């Protein structure tokens, strides 16, 4: 059987694992720059806080109901996610990461219920995170079973009999089926298909003609015929690092710093993938949500003479592009760096006129990496990146770096 | 023999050869100690905590010590554990007898903590190593 394992209220659960005082309380985790609620505890959901609600819109409710607010702590969530994924992998056959807190896994045991109960218990005892597990013959049904698991007493749900499968299909509106969004659901409802069970009864040829092969695959999956492939990790086609600024940026020097930081973060991803970028694209923009302010949105693309994965090259290209489009007098709210034309680093074609030996640069980047790994992420930066930037992310409520900084590990008295 | 054959010819490798003579140790070498592996045999369930006071000083835990904690182990009686009590983390001996559970300090200046029914209490993990820097 195929299982979909996912963590309940993942970001909130990670915060609670290292701050047990948050249990039982309404807790929300905010997106970058303390923007919107991207995770809510059950208590916060009960207060009516919807997913994606901007924090400023519920400031009164937060104060009156004592909602605990946390800024997103991605270093923490990333590490906890890694641990959960590895625990699932150790217990399963083939696996596929679906998101930061969800994984598809093939159950290797004929007793799926016992396997699920054990895995649930092990993830809980190893990490303190609560998970739900849905099992079925297809990925689409496993996802549906996972939703049912969240409402169950045991934390897992099996669609191992026809009775159970039909029962759940009849109780699931089409809009809640994996792969069917709002618009498609509306079209299906207009044709009289309200539940997933209705959809399975539709003629396959008609589905294929009206809605395409993707919905046909979904229908087949709902009918217990697996036809979705297991994803193999495809190499990235582009890398993008873009951020909104905590405070508006007004000078070219500040913008150059920000772009240097983004370009360096992009370089790290290239390094990880073993690729080099042939094109650097940057964009800068004012706050689209403040139409009263003068608006400016510009972008620029620079082609590198030789594809590169070295921060100094990418930073230089970004500065060059910035010089061409920066205009004084605007309050810039967001900027980004996009790297394109990615090629495997070993296949970079040297430009006839390009003189710097690639070996020297690789050695330099190795040393930078090693020092940053040992002493912390930003120990060595290219000269343009500043120490305390004015545009840094606003994260007023972020929990300590419990897992990545020895000065911030949890305290016990 | 063609030139190609010479280049791909396999030469049997007879062990580490130091300048001059074959090492008498070569048949007996073992892997070096991997401290990380010794201290953290189960990395997926291991976390670090910091002791902040002297309540466990007689258990060799001074303030500032790093505690290596394994969340997946069930504590034996009298194990040193990290416990959460009323939302705070404590490091204490976990003691269970017929009367119930108590958390005991290792310092006469501190009082034992009885854990009653309905108390907000949980064992978070078991302390497996204490790391102290001398001086």
Image (spheres, coloured by chain):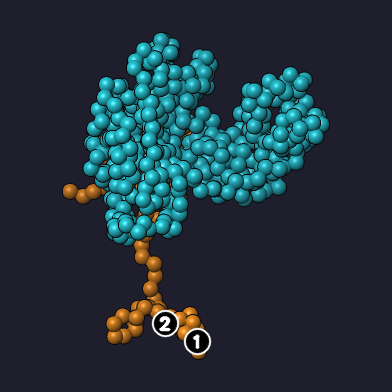
Chain colours: A cyan, B orange
Q: Residue at x 70, y 22 (%)?
A: A187
**Left or right relative to A81: residue A334:** left
Tell me how far mark 1 sits from mark 2, CA to CA.
26 Å
Q: Residue at x 38, y 15 (%)?
A: A290
Mark 2: few, some, or many residues within 10 Å (few <14, many ≥20)?
Answer: few
Q: Residue A215: x, y in percent?
A: 70, 33
Task: Give the quarter of the image for residue A222.
Answer: top right
Out of A354 and A212, give the one closest to the viewer.
A354
Question: Looking at the image, is A223 positioned above or below residue A352?
Answer: above
Quickly name the residue at label 2.
B14
Mark found first going from the N terminus, 1 or 2:
1
Quickly name the residue at label 1.
B2
Q: Residue B61: x, y in percent?
A: 28, 43
Task: Give the quarter of the image for residue A260.
Answer: top left
- Tag 1 and tag 2 share a subunit: yes
In this orientation, does residue B75 appear? no
Q: Residue B112: x, y in percent?
A: 34, 32
**Left or right relative to B98: residue A401:** left
Counting labels gives 2
Q: Which residue is drawn at 30% across and 21% down?
A: A331
Out of A159 and A361, give the one closest to the viewer.
A361
Out of A410 and A222, give the one closest to the viewer.
A222
Q: Mark 1 lies on which chain?
A: B
**Left or right relative to A288: residue A380:** left
Mark 1: secondary structure: loop
Task: Give the quarter of the image for residue A225.
Answer: top right
Q: Which chain carries label 2?
A: B
In this orientation, does residue A90 appear? yes
């Amino acid at each position: 059987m195929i299982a979909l394992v996912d963590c309940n209220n993942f970001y909130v659960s990670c915060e609670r694992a290292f701050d047990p005082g948050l249990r039982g309380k309404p807790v929300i985790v905010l997106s970058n720059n303390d923007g919107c609620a991207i995770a809510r505890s059950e208590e916060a959901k009960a207060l009516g806080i919807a997913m994606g609600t901007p924090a400023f819109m519920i400031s009164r409710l937060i104060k009156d109901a004592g909602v605990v607010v946390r800024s997103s702590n991605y270093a923490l969530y990333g590490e906890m996610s890694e641990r959960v994924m590895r625990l699932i992998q150790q217990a399963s056959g083939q696996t596929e990461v679906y998101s930061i807190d969800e994984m598809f896994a093939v159950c290797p045991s004929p007793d799926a219920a016992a396997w699920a109960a054990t895995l649930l218990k092990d993830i809980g005892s190893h990490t303190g995170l609560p998970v739900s597990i849905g099992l079925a013959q297809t990925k689409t049904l496993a996802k549906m079973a996972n939703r049912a698991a969240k409402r169950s007493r045991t934390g897992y749900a099996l669609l191992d009999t026809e009775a159970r499968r039909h029962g759940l299909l009849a109780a699931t509106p089409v809009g809640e089926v994996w792969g069917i969004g709002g618009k498609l659901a509306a079209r299906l409802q207009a044709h009289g298909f309200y539940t997933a069970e209705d959809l399975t009864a539709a003629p396959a040829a008609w589905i294929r003609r009206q809605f395409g092969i993707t919905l046909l695959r979904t229908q087949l999956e709902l009918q217990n015929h697996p036809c979705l492939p297991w994803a193999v990790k495809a190499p990235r086609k582009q890398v993008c690092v873009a951020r909104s600024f905590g405070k508006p940026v007004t000078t070219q020097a500040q913008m150059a710093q920000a772009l240097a930081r983004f370009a360096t973060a992009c370089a790290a991803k290239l390094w990880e993938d073993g690729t080099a970028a042939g094109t650097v694209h940057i964009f800068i923009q004012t706050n689209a949500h403040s139409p009263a302010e003068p608006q400016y949105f510009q972008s620029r693309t620079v082609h590198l003479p030789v594809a590169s994965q070295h921060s100094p090259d990418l930073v230089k290209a970004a500065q060059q592009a910035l010089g061409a489009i920066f205009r004084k007098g605007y309050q810039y709210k967001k900027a980004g760096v996009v790297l394109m034309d990615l090629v495997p680093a070993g296949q970079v074609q040297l430009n006839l006129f390009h003189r710097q030996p690639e070996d020297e640069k690789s050695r330099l980047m190795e040393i930078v990496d090693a020092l940053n790994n040992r002493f912390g992420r930003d120990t060595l930066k290219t000269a343009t990146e500043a120490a305390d930037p004015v545009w840094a992310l606003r994260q007023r409520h972020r929990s300590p770096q419990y897992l990545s900084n020895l000065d911030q590990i949890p305290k016990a008295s | 023999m063609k030139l190609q054959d010479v280049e791909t010819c396999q030469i049997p490798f007879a062990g580490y050869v130091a300048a001059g003579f074959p090492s008498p140790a070569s048949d007996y070498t073992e892997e070096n100690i991997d401290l990380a592996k010794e201290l953290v045999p189960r990395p997926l369930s291991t976390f670090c905590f910091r002791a902040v006071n002297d309540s466990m000083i007689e258990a060799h835990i001074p303030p500032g010590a790093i505690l290596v904690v394994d969340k997946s182990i069930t504590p034996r009686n009298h194990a040193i554990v990290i416990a959460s009590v009323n939302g705070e983390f404590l490091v204490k001996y976990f003691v269970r007898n017929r009367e119930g559970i108590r958390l005991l300090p290792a310092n006469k200046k501190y009082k034992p903590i009885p854990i009653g029914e309905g108390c907000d209490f949980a064992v978070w993990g078991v302390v497996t190593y204490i790391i102290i820097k001398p001086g």
